[in-house]
Image: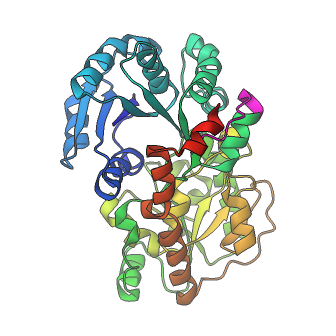
Amino acid sequence: MVYLTLGDRYSGVIASQVLDVAAFLQEELGEKVLVIAFISIRQFFQQRARFKHRGQRVWVVPMAPGLHRWRLNKWLMKILILLSGEKKAICRGVLATNLALTLKESGTLQQLIYDGRGATQAEWKEYEVVRSPQLIQEIGALEGRAILDTDWRIAVSQALVDHWQEEFGYQKHAHSIIPCTVNQLFLADLPSVSKRLEKRLSYGFDKQAVVLIYAGSSAGWQSFQRMDRWLLELMDQQAAIHILFLAKIELEQLACYRAYPKRVAKDWVRHEDMLLTLSIGDYGLLVREDSVTNQVASPTKFAEYLCGGLQVLISPKLGDYSAMVAQEELGHVVQLEQFDMPVLPQPTEEQKQQLHLIGTSRYSKQSYQSAYEQVLQPSSEQTLAQS
């Protein structure tokens, strides 16, 4: 099997959602997987080294300049598939899937699995992810083809499947729901209380501080500016609240930092150190605006927060997770436009350990072994459901 990606730079997300999945399929399920990654020629050799440092079967090749020229990658992809000798492919995203569909039509590939990470058309239009007007205009048709014309689908949430049904008329039952799972590093035990306290003090947060952690980017769907205003109001109301941003941002641009510089810190840590860093906090922030992109999402950070022993502050209708937080009391569902938050206490050590257990038991790749087996070898009953 090959795992195809197009235009995805190496990142923690790619490591977890592509390379770790490929390793899991091979080591746990016996499916040999070759990752073929088409990446930008910008910093190509640096990116290639990062993809290949783990020693997996990964072919990293330069893609045609500009995502709007995505079709030009067809012939190189065909050559690579022929060299690999593989006939089955998992395709990450809409464009990689559409390229693979052309190869299936010519007989180069026989079976395709669409790895649907979100609502692509909605995301591109809501957050201007791509600047090419032509590509934005045709993305809806391309996404529909990826959903309807492949042999099997991976969806990160039931909300995403619902979106496929409503927006694209998807009526089959040929899909597996596999949320974004965590890297193996997050499955370790929580660091000791003493290590956590030492790390907490290094940021200037004392034992009494209630620490909220934001881990992620400042991309449009993160609703960063609105979250900043909400945090400022929360800090005005609750003097114990402190914030740690694990993001590449300028603190001086944040209203909450300008108002309370001693209660706000930032850092950028290695993936290997993320579990310890998250574990010093009390709550993880997943507060975003109401958009289609967010309604179908499965943020990896939700699982990582739980593995770090954090309760989650989450917006309504964020994938499948908002209802879960409310039903299982894993944190609080909050509105960015409302500032009537209850006083947030520190979770007890028992609560942190329980949250960690929930995260590790539900969001390891091993937890979805049966779903991955379904992806690799649909049963005859499932195959009939496609027709």
Is residue 237 visible in the rendered structure shown here?
Answer: no
Q: Is residue 56 magenta?
A: no
In front of the other: 288 or 162:
162
The answer to whether 310 is drawn above or below residue 298 in the figure is below
**Residue 214: x, y in percent?**
53, 59
In front of the other: 225 or 260:
225
- Residue 24 lies left or right of residue 181; in this view the side is left
- Residue 307 lies left or right of residue 46; in this view the side is right
* Image quarter hosting the N terminus: top left
**Residue 16: x, y in percent?**
39, 51
Q: How many marks?
A: 0
The answer to whether 189 is drawn above or below residue 7 in the figure is below
**Residue 114: x, y in percent?**
51, 34
Residue at horizontal 38 percent and vertical 79 percent from the top:
189
**Residue 47: x, y in percent?**
26, 36
The answer to whether 15 is drawn above or below residue 74 in the figure is below
Residue at horizontal 65 percent and vertical 53 percent from the top:
227
* Image quarter hosting the C terminus: top right
Is residue 132 visible in the rendered structure shown here?
Answer: yes
Q: Which image quadrant for residue 38? A: top left
Residue at horizontal 26 percent and vertical 17 percent from the top:
79
- Residue 189 lies left or right of residue 325; in this view the side is left
Q: Is residue 170 magenta?
A: yes
| Type of secondary structure dominating the magenta stretch | loop
Residue at horizontal 65 percent and vertical 76 percent from the top:
239
Scheme by which the image is coloured: rainbow
Instruction: Single out the residue that lies furthest toward the front.
Output: 380
Q: Please report the bounds of the magenta region as a residue range.
A: 166-175
